[in-house]
Image: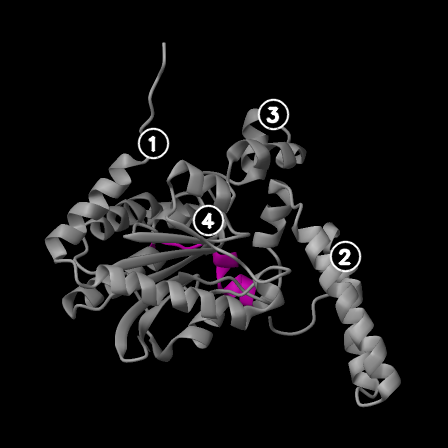
């Protein structure tokens, strides 16, 4: 969302869209009030809509993976800015340090006080390195849990935004208890006595995603992905060839429609034409509407019943019948 993105940075199937956007930007920089320029801009915008409809009506699972990773896709802080008021970010896990790969804090949605937690990737290389490409260390998960427990103490609902390739697998993260930090989050979120609304907005990668994704309602954006492993990782294990990621994406059933059918998520939020990055404000409004609907459904449920339903929700996942 911030700054220009080169044509080379976008997925190959979206190159025609990027070229048209570049041409539209160049015309607008000339003299947008000129009638000739206005007519040409109108033709280009119609052509852009046509391209977007044609391309996005037939995306393959592998292409959806690339949209989920799009360099201009809105991140957690973008949605916080567009949806919430008076966001106050809290830092540190009170044990080791702060982890910029996870953003956590308190905010208002209208008159409703909330806690907001989410993965945060970077835009430019400097920010990507600072936020570790959205891959949290254990202190990130502990910070997230600290904020969620604070929300429970003051009866504030929790909203989480999931967007990570996975938890960071480095030696330091493992030494500081990466697996335990994620496991503790799963346990504590399962019994948190306030409503939890989860939004998978980009990549939902393995336990790194699940560490902030145990909730009462799980929403997934139309072109987000959610999987136990990345397509490249899956291809490397199954075929010993990361180049087979396209086939792995098909086999993993990681798209929103697949996961809704499998009962892993509760609702798919349709994205604007061309994806969330084409109109972040419109996507933010749809997420805000889902939050308001979710709160209306959940806020009147007694805490014990809320926890019981959440537990049963996750216990039902993976249940299947075997016909002999």
Above or below for 60 versus 287: above
Above or below for 109 versus 185: below
Quadrant location of the C terminus in the rendered image:
top left
Q: Residue at x 28, y 58 (%)?
A: 196
- Magenta region includes residue 136: yes
In this orientation, which residue lies closer to the viewer: 305 or 199? 305
Q: Quadrant of residue 195?
A: bottom left
Q: Residue at x 34, y 51 (%)?
A: 213
Q: Residue at x 61, y 27 (%)?
A: 240
Q: Which mark is residue 204?
A: 4
Q: CA distance from mark 2 to mark 1?
A: 39 Å
Q: Residue at x 55, y 68 (%)?
A: 127
**CB contact under 8 Å: marks 2 and 1:** no
Q: Which mark is residue 318?
A: 1
Residue 89, image x, y percentages: 35, 74
- Magenta region includes residue 321: no
Q: Nearer the viewer, mark 3 or mark 2?
A: 2
Residue 228, image x, y percentages: 44, 38
């Amino acid at each position: 969302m911030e700054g220009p993105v080169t044509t080379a940075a976008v997925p190959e199937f979206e190159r025609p869209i990027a070229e048209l956007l570049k041409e539209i930007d160049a015309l607008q920089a000339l003299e947008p009030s000129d009638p000739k320029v206005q007519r040409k801009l109108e033709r280009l915008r119609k052509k852009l809509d046509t391209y977007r409809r044609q391309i996005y009506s037939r995306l393959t699972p592998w292409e959806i993976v690339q949209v989920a990773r799009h360099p201009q896709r809105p991140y957690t802080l973008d949605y916080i800015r567009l949806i919430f008021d008076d966001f106050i970010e809290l830092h540190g896990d009170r044990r080791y340090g702060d982890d910029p790969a996870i953003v956590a804090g308190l905010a208002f949605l209208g008159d409703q006080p909330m806690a907001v937690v989410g993965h945060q990737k970077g835009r430019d290389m400097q920010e990507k390195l600072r936020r570790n490409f959205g891959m949290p260390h254990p202190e990130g998960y502990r910070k997230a849990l600290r904020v969620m427990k604070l929300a429970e103490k003051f009866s504030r609902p929790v909203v989480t935004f999931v967007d990570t390739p996975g938890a960071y697998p480095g030696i330091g993260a493992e030494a500081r208890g990466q697996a335990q930090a994620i496991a503790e989050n799963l346990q504590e979120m399962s019994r948190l006595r306030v409503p939890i609304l989860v939004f998978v907005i980009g990549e939902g990668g393995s336990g790194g995603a699940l560490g902030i994704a145990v909730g009462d309602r799980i929403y997934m954006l139309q072109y987000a992905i959610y999987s136990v492993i990345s397509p490249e990782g899956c291809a490397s294990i199954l075929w010993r060839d990361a180049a087979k990621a396209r086939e792995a994406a098909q086999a993993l059933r990681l798209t929103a429609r697949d996961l809704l059918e499998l009962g892993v998520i509760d609702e798919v939020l349709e994205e604007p034409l061309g994806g969330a990055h084409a109109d972040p404000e419109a996507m933010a409004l749809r997420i805000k509407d889902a939050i308001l609907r979710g709160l209306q459904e959940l806020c009147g449920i007694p805490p014990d019943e809320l926890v019981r339903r959440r537990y049963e929700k996750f216990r039902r996942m993976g249940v299947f019948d075997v016909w002999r």
